[in-house]
Image (spheres, rainbow, N blue to C red):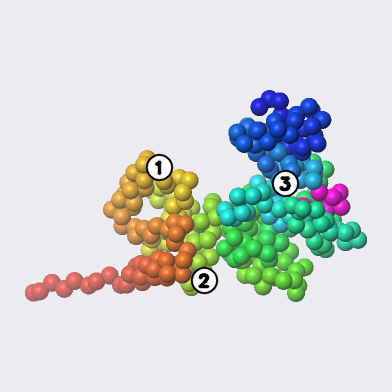
C-alpha cells in the first residue's frame, strides 16, 4: 500500500512515481485503492478531508469551472449520490462561468450557470459553490425527498438557517425548480440526522400531518433515557426511522425491542419506519396510524359516574 501516495492522484501521477498500470489495476482489484472520481484514485486507508476531496476534483476539471451540485455537496461532506449510481463512479458535476465553454470531457457533467463572486470559494485551488449556494441548487435540481435530505444535511454541517435559504432564493426568480425550492426552504431543519428522517418529515408534511419535534429526549426520573427521531411529545407519539446501519445486528434488534417496550409501558405510541416504508401503500398505512394516534390523544377523558 505504501507505494501509492497518501493523497488523491491520477494515472499520470502514479506513472511518474514508477507505478505500472498493472499495479494500479491490482490495487483497485484488491481494495488497496479506491476510485474517487473518474481517473482519480486514493489509498483505501486515507481519511479524506474537505481539502482532499476538492484537490481530487482539481486534478480533472477546467480552471474556469466551478464544482457544483452533488459533487460540491460531497466536497462539503454530504453524500447525495443515490445507491443505484454507485456501481460506477458518479460524474463530476461542474458549472462553467459565463464566457467560457462548458466541458465535454467524459465523466464530467457540465453546463453554464450564472454564479457571482459570493457563490463560490476556493478550496485546494478549485472553485466550489458555497454550502448555501449548493443547498439552493440541489433544492431546485433533486427530487423533493432527496433535496430536503441534502438541504437538511448541509444546514446541519455548515450552520445556515431556513431564513437564509429563503432570503437567497429571491435570486432564483423563474428558474426551473424554484417553486420546489421555496416550499422546501420552510421545511429545512438542521436537527435531522439522516436522510430517512428527512424523507419521513416530507411525507408527513404531504399527508397534512402536524410538524413533529426532532430529536426529542424522553426522561426517566429526571435523567435523559431515550432520544426520539420524531415526536409529538404532548400526545406521546414517537416516529422512529430505523436505518440499516444501526438497526440490523442482533444486538441492535435487542436494544430496539427493549427501547420499544419501555416506551410503550410509559404511555408512548411508537410507529417504526424503515427504507421499505416509502411506497404509496406503506405511506398511507403509517400516516393513517399517526393520524389515528393524534385523534386518540385529543379525545376528552372519559367521565365516570358512581351509582348512588
* Residue 83 locus on image (x, y percent): 57, 53
On residue 38, the disc is 3
Q: Does the magenta stretch include residue 63?
A: yes
Question: Where, by quadrant of the figure, is residue 125 drawn?
Answer: top right
| Mark 1, secondary structure of its residue | loop
Q: Distance between the residues labelled 3 and 1?
A: 34 Å
Image position, residue 120 (x, y; %): 79, 53
| Residue 248 appears in the picture as rendered | yes
Q: Which residue lies furthest to the front in this view?
A: 22
Foreground of the two, 308 or 119 = 119
Q: In this view, does 273 lie to the left or right of 165?
A: left
| Residue drawn at (31%, 57%) of the image | 267
* Residue 48 on the magenta segment: no
The quarter in which the N terminus is drawn is: top right
Residue position marked by numbered label 2 in the rendering = 206
In this view, which residue lies farthest toward the left?
Answer: 308
Q: Kindly identify which residue carries mark 1.
A: 249
**What separation in Å lies between label 2 and label 1 (alpha carbons)?**
32 Å
* Image quadrant in which the C terminus is located: bottom left
Q: Earlier in the sequence, mark 2 or mark 1?
A: 2
Amino acid at each position: 500500500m505504501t507505494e501509492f501516495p497518501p493523497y488523491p492522484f491520477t494515472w499520470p501521477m502514479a506513472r511518474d512515481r514508477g507505478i505500472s498500470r498493472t499495479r494500479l489495476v491490482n490495487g483497485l482489484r484488491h481494495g488497496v485503492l479506491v476510485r474517487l472520481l473518474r481517473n482519480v484514485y486514493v489509498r483505501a486507508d486515507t481519511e479524506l478531508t474537505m481539502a482532499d476531496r476538492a484537490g481530487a476534483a482539481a486534478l480533472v476539471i477546467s480552471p474556469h469551472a466551478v464544482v457544483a451540485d452533488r459533487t460540491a455537496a460531497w466536497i462539503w461532506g454530504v453524500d447525495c449520490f443515490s445507491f443505484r449510481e454507485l456501481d460506477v463512479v458518479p460524474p463530476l458535476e461542474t458549472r462553467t462561468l459565463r464566457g467560457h465553454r462548458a466541458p465535454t470531457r467524459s465523466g464530467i457533467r457540465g453546463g453554464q450557470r450564472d454564479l457571482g463572486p459570493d457563490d463560490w470559494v476556493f478550496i485546494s485551488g478549485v472553485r466550489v459553490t458555497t454550502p448555501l449556494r449548493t443547498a439552493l441548487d440541489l433544492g431546485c435540481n433533486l427530487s423533493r425527498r432527496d433535496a430536503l435530505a441534502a438541504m437538511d444535511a448541509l444546514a446541519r454541517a455548515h450552520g445556515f438557517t431556513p431564513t437564509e435559504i429563503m432570503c437567497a432564493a429571491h435570486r432564483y426568480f423563474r428558474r426551473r425548480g424554484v417553486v420546489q425550492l421555496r416550499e422546501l426552504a420552510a421545511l429545512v431543519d438542521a436537527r435531522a440526522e439522516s436522510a430517512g428522517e428527512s424523507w419521513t418529515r416530507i411525507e408527513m408534511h404531504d399527508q397534512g400531518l402536524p410538524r413533529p419535534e426532532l430529536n426529542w429526549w424522553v426522561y426517566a426520573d429526571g435523567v435523559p433515557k431515550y432520544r426520539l427521531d420524531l415526536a409529538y411529545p404532548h400526545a406521546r407519539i414517537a416516529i422512529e426511522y430505523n436505518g440499516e446501519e444501526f438497526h440490523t445486528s442482533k444486538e441492535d434488534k435487542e436494544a430496539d425491542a427493549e427501547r420499544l417496550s419501555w416506551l410503550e409501558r410509559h404511555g408512548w405510541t411508537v410507529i417504526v419506519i424503515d427504507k421499505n416504508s416509502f411506497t404509496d401503500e406503506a405511506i398511507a398505512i403509517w400516516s393513517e396510524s399517526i393520524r389515528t394516534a393524534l385523534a386518540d390523544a385529543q379525545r376528552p377523558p372519559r367521565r365516570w359516574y358512581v351509582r348512588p
